[in-house]
Every structure is written in C-alpha cells, then in structure tokens.
C-alpha cells in the first residue's frame, strides 16, 4: 500500500541519521502532533540550537527517544529533537 511505502521510506531516512549512544529507537514510527508552539532542536537538550519552530497542532513522526526528548521528522522532512512535554499522539 502507499502508506506502507511512505512509512518504509521514512524509517530508512530516519535510520540514516546516526543514532546517539543514549538513544532508543522505536519499533515503528509514531504519529504525533505538537500541543503548543514548539522548538525543534539539533539534539535532545535545551542546550542544543533551535533548528525550527512548529505551530500548535503540527503533525510529526517520532522515531526515537532520549530521556524526555524525541527524535522527530515534520511533514516537510525536517529532522530534529522535541521535548516530550510539547507533543501528544495524533488522533
């Protein structure tokens, strides 16, 4: 199916990003969305630079976790890290 093909492509792209030693990859990508405007950062901490800002309700896909942070990709393919407190499962 088209959805399966898209999911496989997203997983392959996410796997190309080098995993950090403390990072736990998810078995399957998670459909998420922001709960408020949210900074997406270079790494899993507020000490990393902000790459871009997402509006409230922006759809994301989660690929891995590191403590209270998730490695995500937005709809346009931009990648980064977001605090778990700023997201929820997409309905």
Image (cartoon, helix red, strand yellow):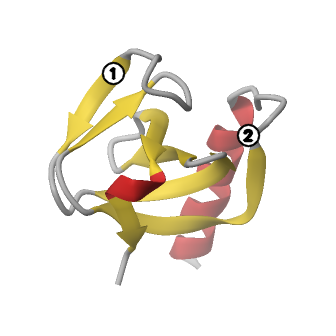
Residue extending furthest bottom? 91
Neighbour tally class for label 2: few under 14, some 14-19, many 20 plus, Cα within 10 Å: few
Position of 70 with respect to 50 (left or right) is: right
Q: Residue 50's mark?
A: 1
For image coordinates 76% across by 51% down, the residue present is 25
Mark 2 and mark 1: Cα distance apart in space: 22 Å
Question: Do the residues under discs 2 and 1 have CB atoms within 8 angstroms?
Answer: no
Q: Nearer the viewer, residue 46 or 81?
A: 46
Instruction: Please tell me whether mark 2 or mark 1 is closer to you in this view.
Output: 1
Q: Residue 12's mark?
A: none
Position of 54 with respect to 59 (left or right) is: left
For image coordinates 72% across by 32% down, the residue present is 16
Position of 31 with respect to 25 (left or right) is: left
Image vertical order of residue 91 relative to residue 4, above or below:
below
Position of 29 with respect to 38 (left or right) is: right
Instruction: Give the mark nearer the N terminus: 2 vs 1.
Output: 2
For image coordinates 48% across by 57% down, the residue present is 61
Position of residue 44 measured from the top left corner of the image (x, y, whole percent): 56, 32
Position of residue 28 measured from the top left corner of the image (x, y, whole percent): 70, 67
The N terminus - image quarter: bottom right
Image vertical order of residue 8 relative to residue 42, above or below:
below
Position of residue 14 measured from the top left corner of the image (x, y, whole percent): 64, 41
For disc 2, the marked residue is 15
Q: Nearer the viewer, residue 60 or 44?
A: 44
Quadrant location of residue 26? Answer: bottom right
Position of residue 7 measured from the top left corner of the image (x, y, whole percent): 60, 63
Element type at mark 1: strand
Image vertical order of residue 49 relative to residue 74, above or below:
above
Neighbour tally class for label 1: few under 14, some 14-19, many 20 plus, Cα within 10 Å: some
The C terminus - image quarter: bottom left
């Amino acid at each position: 199916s088209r959805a399966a093909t898209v999911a496989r492509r997203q997983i392959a792209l996410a796997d190309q990003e080098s995993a950090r030693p403390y990072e736990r990859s998810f078995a399957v990508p998670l459909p998420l969305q922001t709960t408020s405007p949210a900074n997406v950062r270079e790494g899993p901490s507020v000490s990393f630079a902000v790459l871009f800002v997402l509006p409230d309700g922006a759809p994301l896909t989660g690929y891995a976790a590191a403590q209270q942070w998730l490695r995500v990709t937005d709809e346009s393919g931009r990648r980064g890290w977001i605090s778990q407190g700023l997201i929820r499962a997409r309905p």
